Image (cartoon, grey):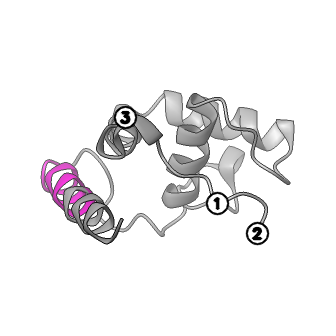
Amino acid sequence: MYKARIRINKEFNEIKKELVDSKVIPSNLSKSPKDSSVEGYTYEDIVRVYTWNKQGIKIDGLSEKDLKAITTFASKDAGLQELSNKLIEINRSQGYHYPGKD
């Protein structure tokens, strides 16, 4: 499990660098977009929610309104979609991990 975690972390860093260098995604994913429809969410949050939703995972505590706003925002951004697809891909058959309520 330790080796898998290291591999995933390494692959994520490579993917992020590639996407940032090509200006497909912002360099600082912890920043919030300048779009009032997703106010209060960072790019990291948006990618996570979009990815989990793509995998059919229900996100605890997230309203349907926020889910719709986030998925609409992400679906209009090819870079966020690409990052989401890569997150699923690097986690192989397990998909992008959802930690659950806690």
Label located before the other in sequence (1 or 3): 3
The amino acid marked with disc number 2 is Asp
- Tell me if mark 1 has few (under 14), some (14-19) or many (20+) residues whose alpha carbon lies within 10 angstroms of its own: few
Q: Residue at x 72, y 57 (%)?
A: 100
Q: Quadrant of residue 89?
A: top left
Say if 69 sits above or below 59 in the image. Answer: above
Q: Nearer the viewer, mark 3 or mark 2?
A: 2
Q: Are marks 3 and 2 in contact (CB under 8 Å)?
A: no
Can you say which quadrant of the picture contains the C terminus?
A: bottom right
- Dot 2 falls on a residue whose secondary structure is loop
The amino acid marked with disc number 1 is Pro
- Dot 3 falls on a residue whose secondary structure is helix
Residue nearest the observer in this picture, 54 or 22: 54
- Residue 36's disc number: none
Identify the magenta region: 12-22
**Secondary structure character of the magenta stretch overall:** helix
The residues bearing labels 3 and 2 have C-alpha atoms spaced at a distance of 25 Å
Looking at the picture, how far across and down is residue 37, in whole percent?
70, 44
Label located before the other in sequence (3 or 2): 3
Label 1: which residue?
Answer: 99
Label 3: which residue?
Answer: 85
Residue nearest the observer in this picture, 86 or 40: 86
Residue nearest the observer in this picture, 25 or 90: 90
The reply, left or right, for residue 89 in relation to residue 101 is: left
Label 2: which residue?
Answer: 102
Q: Is 99 contained in the magenta span? A: no
